[in-house]
């Protein structure tokens, strides 16, 4: 039984940010009911597939962030489906949606309406630019994606090589970090409700989340009036803290403390560098020349040789690809690769595990992602069907 086993979440989200948020809640034991638009979540048909995509009801994108949920297909513009949705809300602890501001209000299903049906409800939204309830701006109602959030929030300006263009971070952090913050907000609101009996609205915006993630640029500008920009893999105030080429790949080295610096120089057989650059200030002032000294040493050795020379004394690691991660016993021992069923395929597939671990309650995927409308009967029973036994939800658009 997970830590959130007594929490029911009605999940109206699709694509990445919202589903990742509710996935975290499901991994901690919450019963997440995925309410899907007619035709289902937009990413159901997205590749990759385990075999023949024509035989599989969804691909890896959908599987990864919707594992362990239940599905029901509802058209919120249909009167009967709207009634069924409200029945779900009346029994729920949380509702999560990631539509543009005003969308739920057009169905007369905004927070204020749902609160009339469930006074203790925690209603949470993930939007590009937030909701007017918590701070109205001219951007609300505009569409937003990860790329937009990374650009506006300052991530791209500080990502990439010094002489290169602004570059987005590989993972969709505009979606994913926002999703994590939203999950934290939901848990905070649930705690408040448990103490007071009062539900509330939780609002997390992608633009806000990226400003928060770039906290270093904010305080740095305030303290110095300097706008931080791209520095490759280095750090503006720590050295050495960088990646270095080896004879067969790359490693990262973080030796910015005096003790780590001495250990690095000892491994390089360069006691002169310890004497000439004994403190952080002198190393920062001469970072370009010192980086070349370290790079000359690492290029003469393999990744493993550099790691063996420094590990235990200096923070060091090889730069791994996904195949390396799958081969790393640490990742398996931590439960960070989880196998789930892939409907329509003749094998299981692997998704990322849950990074949240508890001493007393389990976490992790609670099974595969659902088929579209798979759980209608168990969620609504006879009340979710017409008199002739046919489902009431609309079909494809």
Image: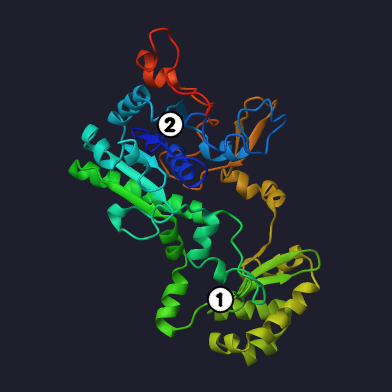
Q: Residue furthest bottom?
A: 276
Which is more toward the observer, 321 or 371?
371
Question: Is residue 121 rendered to the left or right of residue 33?
Answer: left
Q: Point out which mark residue 229 bears.
A: 1
Q: Point out which mark residue 291 bears.
A: none
Residue 379 x, y percent position in the rendering: 39, 22
**Location of residue 251 with respect to 255 vertically, above or below:** above
Question: Is residue 310 rendered to the left or right of residue 151?
Answer: right
Residue at 45%, 78% in the rendered image: 220
Q: Residue furthest left?
A: 196
Q: How is the image coloured?
A: rainbow
Task: For label 1, count other residues whose C-alpha is less than 10 Å away and answer few (under 14), some (14-19) or many (20+).
Answer: some
Circle count: 2
Residue at 21%, 37% in the rendered image: 119
Residue at 44%, 56% in the rendered image: 206
Q: CA distance from mark 2 to mark 1?
A: 42 Å
**Location of residue 277 with respect to 326 vertically, above or below:** below
Task: For label 2, count other residues whose C-alpha is less than 10 Å away and answer few (under 14), some (14-19) or many (20+).
Answer: many
Q: Quadrant of residue 209?
A: bottom left
Q: Quadrant of residue 116?
A: top left
Residue at 63%, 72% in the rendered image: 232
Say whether disc 2 or disc 1 marks the residue closer to the N-terminus: 2
Q: Pointer 2: what residue?
A: 35
Residue 366 x, y percent position in the rendering: 50, 32
Instruction: Name the quadrant of the N terminus.
Output: top left
Could you say whether the residue bearing mark 2 is in a helix, strand or loop?
Answer: strand
Residue 288 x, y percent position in the rendering: 66, 84
Q: Residue furthest top?
A: 388
């Amino acid at each position: 039984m997970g830590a959130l086993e007594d929490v029911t979440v009605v999940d109206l989200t699709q694509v990445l940010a919202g589903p990742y948020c509710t996935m975290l809640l499901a991994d901690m034991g919450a019963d997440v009911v995925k309410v899907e638009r007619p035709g289902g979540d937009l990413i159901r048909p997205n590749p990759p597939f385990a075999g023949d995509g024509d035989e599989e009801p969804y691909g890896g994108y959908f599987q990864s962030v919707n594992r362990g949920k239940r599905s029901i297909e509802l058209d919120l513009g249909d009167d009967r489906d709207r009634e069924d949705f409200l029945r779900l809300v009346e029994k729920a602890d949380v509702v999560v949606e990631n539509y543009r501001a005003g969308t739920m209000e057009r169905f007369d299903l905004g927070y204020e309406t749902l609160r009339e049906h469930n006074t203790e409800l925690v209603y949470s939204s993930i939007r590009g630019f937030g909701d007017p309830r918590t701070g109205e701006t001219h951007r609300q109602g505009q569409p937003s994606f990860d790329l937009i959030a990374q650009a506006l929030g300052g991530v791209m300006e500080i990502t990439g090589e010094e002489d290169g263009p602004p570059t987005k971070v590989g993972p969709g952090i505009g979606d994913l970090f926002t999703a994590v913050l939203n999950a934290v907000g939901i848990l905070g609101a649930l705690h408040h409700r448990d103490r007071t009996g009062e539900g509330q609205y939780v609002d997390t915006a992608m633009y806000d989340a990226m400003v928060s993630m770039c906290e270093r640029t904010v305080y740095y500008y305030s303290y110095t009036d300097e706008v931080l920009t791209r520095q490759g893999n280095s750090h503006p105030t720590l050295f050495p803290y960088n990646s270095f080429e080896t004879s067969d790949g790359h490693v990262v080295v973080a030796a910015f403390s005096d003790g780590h610096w001495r250990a690095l120089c000892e491994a390089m057989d360069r006691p002169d560098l310890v004497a000439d650059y004994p403190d952080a200030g002198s190393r920062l002032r001469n970072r370009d020349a010192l980086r070349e000294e370290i790079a000359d040493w690492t290029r003469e050795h393999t990744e493993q040789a550099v790691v063996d020379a420094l590990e235990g004394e200096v923070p060091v690691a090889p730069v791994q690809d996904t195949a390396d991660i799958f081969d790393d016993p640490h990742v398996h021992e931590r439960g960070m690769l989880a196998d789930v069923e892939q409907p329509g395929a003749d094998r299981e597939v692997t998704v990322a595990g849950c990074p949240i671990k508890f001493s007393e309650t389990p976490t992790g995927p609670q099974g595969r992602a659902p088929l579209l409308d798979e759980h209608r009967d168990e969620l609504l029973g006879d009340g979710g069907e017409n008199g002739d036994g046919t489902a009431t939800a609309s079909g494809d658009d």
